[in-house]
Image (spheres, grey):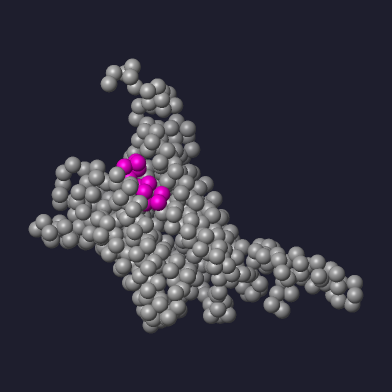
Amino acid sequence: MSLFNVPTALLPTDPSPEWLSKGDNAWQLTAGTMVGLQSVPGLVILYGSIVKKKWAVNSCFMALFAFAAVLVCWVGWGYQMSFGSEKLLPFVGRPGLASLRASYLVEEAFAGKFPNATMIFFQFVFAAITLILIAGALLGRMNFYAWMVFVPIWLTCSYTVGAYSMWCPDGWLAKMGIIDYSGGYVIHLSSGVAGFTAAYWVGPRESKDRERFPPNNILLMLLGAGLLWMGWTGFNGGDPYMASRDASLAVLNTHVCAAMSLLTWLMLDIMFFEKPSVIGATQGMITGLVCITPAAGVVQGWAAMIMGILSGSIPWYTMMVVHKQVSLLKEIDDTMAVFHTHAVAGSLGGVLTGFFAEPRLNRIFFDITDGWQHYIGLAYGLKTGNVRAGLRQMGIQLLGILFVVVWNIVITSLICVAIRVVIPLRMSEEELQFGDEEVHGESAYALWGDGEKLLETSKLYSGHGFDEFSVKEASNFR
């Protein structure tokens, strides 16, 4: 086809240079927006509705604050530390202000046919959701001011290290050949371990909250969970950095695994507890999504189904059986059970990726034309007689788990110990007793005897022999 036959819209221009793929750029921005919607409003709604009524505002706000704070830190220095071309240490990049310069933002990204601005936005939403997942372990007792300090420090000292090591082309684990398609290690394993570790340092909720912590709105919880599930289309579908056939495979595998995991968890609940739990089904959905994340575009459909069965049963077992038998798990108060739903499921997904990863699909995703010794799952190593390569891949996957676990335990502990020297990690006893009204001066529900109606009642009777009393004092009568 001659130049004169090319549609005008496809001709290179200054705003749309030759290297830019309009389709890939549009998909990447769409995928990033879908991941962002998982957090805001997805997890904001889920957190605010799955907790006790008195913690609804605080739980929502922890997620909302983290989303905003991470973005500012990400464009300031986080992206360069995670994906920058200048290395500071073997496991992290050099912080810099390049992400704030227009000349850099409109240049071609290190991967994909779109500008750096698109890549920075896409990677930001992954960083943000990681911090929000950590918040899930701390709901109902962490000092909000301590959380405001924790978010930027943890992003800088922990998330950037994992992202650079496994996702940046210069990262040491990336060079070894680790397979973490979309964040089973970088996001879910790290958030599960960091959340569990931080929960240890913050301490448990009040005894009455820990013993009885009913959701204040299960229907809204399902709305948040639905946004989380559907948003995972962008979570895993965006990581090939192009609107490719691999992206399509990743999207389908993601939803198949999630559905199978949900059904498996539901059947186990029915078999052992004789009740089809909605909350249990939601947890099964999440573990399926987490498990398939490191493998989404590099495994066959039947492997995704097997992973769904395992992700709906193994985390179920660790949560329902092992958790009640291990003293450490019982002692640490992990509000949203992120250790089981993210650390256990993420580790499981990483190991199963090392077993089921198909070389042909890996070569499509990693864009390599040779090197059968790289990116081959153990199952295919056994099938092709290349067992050594399969065992090597499995070893790299296990090394990645070890690195993420150790790094996050150490760094998260150091951060929490440092913060509590200046700011209490835990709310005061009064804040723990009254929740949102004491912490934020706001209440999630101002209807049917709560909030504003209560204030009007107190004013009505203040002139008839009754002393005006506050909402906080009235909460004692609930």
Give the image quarter of residue 103. Answer: top left
Quadrant placement of the C terminus: bottom right
Which residues lie in the magenta part? 233-244
> Would residue 366 be visible to someone looking at this image?
yes
8 or 39, nearer to the observer? 8
Q: Residue furthest right?
A: 464
Residue at left 43%, top 69%?
Answer: 281
3 or 44, nearer to the observer? 3
Residue at left 42%, top 46%?
Answer: 31
Q: Count all numbered tags in the image, as a single digit.
A: 0
Residue at left 9%, top 58%?
Answer: 385
Q: Does 333 appear in magenta?
A: no
Q: Left or right? Give the position of 434 relative to 348.
A: right
Image x and y of residue 183, in percent: 36, 55
Q: Left or right? Give the position of 454 relative to 110.
A: right
Residue at left 44%, top 43%?
Answer: 30
Image x and y of residue 4, in percent: 33, 17
Q: Is residue 326 above or below residue 244?
A: below
Q: Is residue 113 above or below residue 7?
A: below
Image x and y of residue 65, in percent: 56, 55
Image x and y of residue 76, in percent: 49, 44
Give the image quarter of residue 85. Answer: top left
> Would residue 425 be visible to someone looking at this image?
no
Q: Residue furthest left?
A: 385
127 or 424, nearer to the observer? 127
Q: Is residue 97 above or below residue 467?
A: above
